[in-house]
Image (tube, helix red, strand yellow):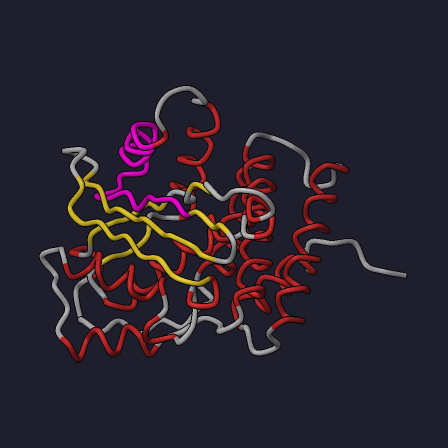
Amino acid sequence: MKKICIIIITLFLLIHCGESFRPIRNVPEKAKKVVLFLDFENNSIGSGKDNWDGLRRAIPSMILTDFKNFGTYRPVTEDARLSALKELKRVQQGILEDRGIQAGKLASADFILSGNFMEISSSIAITAKLTDVQTGEAVSSSSQQGHVDSILNPPEKSLIKKTSITLLSQTQYNPTTNEIQMIADVIETKKIQAAVKNYEGEIIMDDVALLKKSGKSAESQEVKSLEEKANWKFKSAVSEDPSYERAKQNMEATVSLLPPAF
């Protein structure tokens, strides 16, 4: 079991650390604030509930990437994140934010990144918040809205970049104008559908990791079926954007888990 967990953690480090990373501020690793992100709530109405569901993971993950690139924050370890996810799934009752804070304490996080989005008739509103795990108080918040095309474009003014910069600007690490531009310059993909598919795949792979962490055999039909589904999502993302490095690394990681084709 221990060997399986190590393999899982290694896989997810590949999946979640493949994006561009260049810290702007040179802060010692131990001095960085630790963040656990929660998947954002999808409050969309109609077809948007399914069509944009990958944004539940895409929005907070991209924001956390900006935080990492800024250099003053780092994510919780992958093992701690999976343990926190397992706890959230176990405790189904209660307000998500309150359960998230408990998960944050379990993961030894300093902050919780949480939020929601709502898409209606091609318009989208994104709300995000950074909460102190110890006090339960929000240290920064952001509300952005616009057309769905503006979620990632133009990169320097996208809704996600605006959210990241707004959240950072309200903290003690208020970025300078030059640093804001540097944050805006690092992009993951310009293709929103590629991002949606990739993060749908990452959500599925979390389910795989949690099943394995709970003792499910890596060879079980349930696990293999989910891995195949995730791989198809990653392939779709790469098809949408052949230059999407994160999706390509995810695809390669899941291919290594699947049985060879004859």
* Above or below: residue 177 compared with residue 83: below
The image shows residue 121 at horizontal and vertical percentages of: 52, 54
The residue shown at (32%, 38%) is: 107
Question: Which residue is outermost to the left?
Answer: 172
Q: Position of residue 223 (x, y in %)?
A: 69, 40
In the rendered image, which quarter is residue 31 located in? bottom left
Q: Is residue 46 above or below residue 159?
A: above
Residue sitting nearer the eye, 178 or 77: 178
Q: Residue at x 52, y 42 (%)?
A: 45
Quarter of the C terminus within the rendering: bottom right
Which residue appears at 60% of the width and 51% of the height?
Answer: 51
Q: Answer left or right for 206 relative to 73.
A: right
On screen, residue 70 above or below 224: below
Please indicate whether residue 103 sits to the left or right of residue 71 in the image: right
Q: Can the viewer see residue 4 in this picture?
A: no
Residue furthest front as drawn: 121
Q: Residue at x 68, y 35 (%)?
A: 217
Residue 173 appears in view: yes
- Span of residues in magenta: 97-117
- Please state the horizontal and vertical placement of residue 90, each as a whole percent of the image: 47, 24
Q: Is residue 224 magenta?
A: no
Q: Quadrant of residue 134?
A: top left
Rendered location of residue 137, percent (x, y): 16, 37
